[in-house]
Image: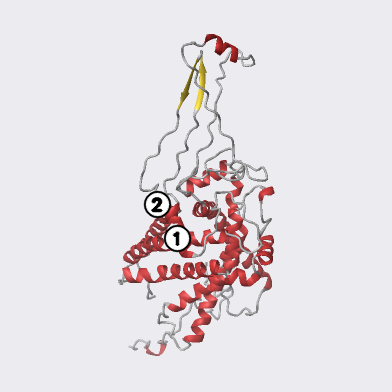
Amino acid sequence: MSSPASIRDLYIEPSSAWSFVPPAAPIPVNASTPPPLPSYQWSSRPAHNSIFDLSPSLDLTEPSGVNAAHLFKTLVASALLQYSSTAIAMPWEVGKLLLQVQWVPRDTGDPEPTAELVDENDEDALSDTSNEDSYFADPGITPTARRPTPRLLADDQGYVVRRSVLEEGTRPEYIIPVGSANGAWGMIKRIGRFRGEGWLALWKGLLTACITEIISSTAQPLIHNLLQSLFLPTLSPFHQPPILLPIASHLITGFLLSPLDLIRTRLIVQSFTRRYQTYSGPLDAFSQILRDEGGLRGIYLHPHLLFPTIIDNTLRPVVSLALPGILAAQANPIAWGLAELGGSCIGLLVTLPFETVRRRLQVQTRGMAKPLRGCVELRPAPYNGVVDTLWHILTEERSDLPMRRPRRRRSSDKGKEREEVEDDVEEEDTWSKNTGIGQLYRGLGMRLGASVIVFLLALVSGGEESDSGWAEI
């Protein structure tokens, strides 16, 4: 009896290399037809990993040269995305900025001159009533003289002098009534319904704001990397650089882009009516500022523009980068999100007053430039620096918006008796009327709401990613 054949010589050691293509089945020698192919076969070609055909290809065999068409398409798509996102947020930015620069004086001046309103129910308005009054008058009662209407004051050239910001007759037609809106949303509705502005005025300065955002988001990382390569060339990528480098990069970027921010502010504040506009566009504003306000030296180094720029562009990165690390030292994502929310709220209390001061000083013209015709009330006298602006806002302005307007005193004729009706309502003496601290925090509610929304979105998106670290295959 023969022993069975050994299978020891038929053993083949399996390959340790990874293979994504299944090995082909051995072809029999005497087979007349080839075996059928498998229903699915793995492909070694990399998958198409592009969004709108804008991301780079994953195929390493392709040449790594610069594709001009692909680069142009990427730049256009990025510009459109940035433009659309800026356009969505622009109405709230316009409303907040106009609230920041609006001058709301505590002392509104003399009230409007008394106006006598004649009753429309008179039977014969064209007849002479002087004889009738004397005929029916009681001879035993001494007649009382009618209070004369005070005349409007005029200057040497015959122009009417405006005695109060609440006067409707002397208020220019392009100025929104002072104190008529409270909050960014209220100002948005007021702008849209005002005859001199309209709903399209909510997108004033959109192009300049979009260009500023694009340049800032591109230049700030480049400046940060340049500073890191100059001062910390041996720093490991796994070590966090000092906080001074990102603060310095934000400060340099804000300083370089300060002329664009100045132009954006003035385009937003100026009237939307064409005949009252000072600048026809960004280029015209830039040329006029260079010509009338001291050139590049005046734009960058004037004390009313330089110091607010330095303060504003230093406090913002300090608040956003330092406060979350101070408030939450743990690595818990929820604790870090709460720390960022608390840091943004605390930071707004610090940065908003200086941002308001910067906007007030940007609206002021210097040199030979004509005063800006704003769509809101602007302070007639110029400010003299950061401290002076803070002091005058706190001491001469009020925070109770919207303001109650005193009504006119009217007189009516009913029968033959004349009576005067007083409609003036005395305002309550509250603390918000006697301080301008609320003027320094215009737009605070909008900013806090945006911070809460960002925190909730981060919390919801972060909750789905339970394991965001490396995973073993």
Tell me the number on the disc at residue 307.
none
Residue 408 left/right relative to 455: right
Note whether 72 is above or below 200 in the view shown: below
Residue type, mark 2 in image: Thr
Q: Residues within 10 Å of mark 2 (few under 14, many from 20)?
A: some
Residue beneath disc 2: 435
Note whether 173 is above or below 43 in the view shown: above
Q: Residues within 10 Å of mark 1 (few under 14, many from 20)?
A: some
Image quadrant containing the C terminus: bottom left
Q: x and y percent of residue 15 in the render?
A: 44, 85
SS for dot 2: loop
For this rendering, which residue is in front, 180 or 330?
180
Tell me the CA gap for discs 2 and 1: 12 Å
Residue 11 left/right relative to 222: left
Q: Residue furthest bottom?
A: 9
Q: x and y percent of residue 111 in the render?
A: 50, 38
Q: Is residue 35 visible?
A: no
Image quadrant containing the N terminus: bottom left
User: Residue drawn at (46%, 81%), measured in percent from left and top?
Assistant: 18
SS for dot 1: helix
Q: x and y percent of residue 83 in the render?
A: 59, 59
Q: x and y percent of residue 443 in the render?
A: 45, 54
Residue type, mark 1 in image: Leu
Q: Residue furthest top?
A: 135
For this rendering, which residue is in front, 286 or 113?
113
Tell me the number on the disc at residue 390.
1
